[in-house]
Image (cartoon, grey):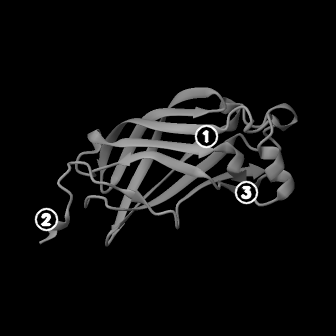
Amino acid sequence: MLAALLPASPLWAQTLLPQGAEIVFTSKQMGVPVEGRFKSFKLDAFQFDPKKPEAAKIALTVHTKSAAVGTPEVDAELVKPEWFDAAKFPEAKFVAQSVKPLGGGKFEMQGQFTLKGQSKAMTVPLQLAQAGAISTATGSFALKRKDWKIGTGEWADTSIVADEVQVRFKFPFSGMAPL
């Protein structure tokens, strides 16, 4: 009976469930964690069969002007040239070029990340969990803001704003094949 409900295509048609989807970043300002998030992003592609990760198509676009920590003064600073320069670089992108299974619902995505006009190879961990018809893709990784020219000029001092920024994501989906 279950087979009749499954799509015939080898790639399952996933649908992102916006409720609960998030991209969060945490930096430290003078040693104190400051959490922010990107309020606007889109998955340009997410076709993923956990049994055939090598056939995955994953691409994400983040709208840099949507960066927010919840303080109007800081949010206004984040879009300026010293930080994300959202007028000149309105999008950051990640495009996976390969996905490797690690076992237990864990995967490793290798791809190109583009931020503030620079593209670099990046490895991003991906964990899949399933509960009924909902699959949730999560992961986290660290970025060095100086590598991406985020926080330049008077903000380049890493004793005020730490160089390392933790980024985590959560994307709930319907329509994914079982693990």
Judge whether 176 appears above or below 122 on screen: below
Residue that label 2 marks: 3
| Circle 1: residue type | Leu
| Circle 2: residue type | Ala
CA distance separating discs 1 and 2: 42 Å
| Circle 3: residue type | Pro
**N-term mark: 1 or 3:** 3
Pick whichever, 132 or 143, lies toward us.
132
The tag on residue 143 is: 1
The tag on residue 33 is: 3
Pick whichever, 17 or 151, lies toward us.
17
- In the rendered structure, the answer to whether residue 131 lies left or right of residue 117 reads left
The tag on residue 107 is: none
- In the rendered structure, the answer to whether residue 136 lies left or right of residue 170 reads left
Quarter residue 97 falls in: top left
Residue at horizontal 25 percent and vertical 48 percent from the top:
11
- The image position of residue 3, as x and y in percent, is 13, 65
Q: Is mark 3 on a helix, strand or loop?
A: strand
From the image, state whether disc 1 or disc 2 is nearer to you.
2
- Say whether residue 22 is visible: yes
Residue at horizontal 46 percent and vertical 63 percent from the top:
17
**N-term mark: 3 or 2:** 2
CA distance separating discs 3 and 2: 48 Å
**N-term mark: 1 or 2:** 2
Q: Is mark 1 on a helix, strand or loop?
A: strand
- In the rendered structure, the answer to whether residue 160 lies left or right of residue 107 reads right
Quarter residue 61 falls in: top right
Quarter residue 32 falls in: bottom right
From the image, state whether disc 3 or disc 2 is nearer to you.
2
- Say whether residue 30 is visible: no
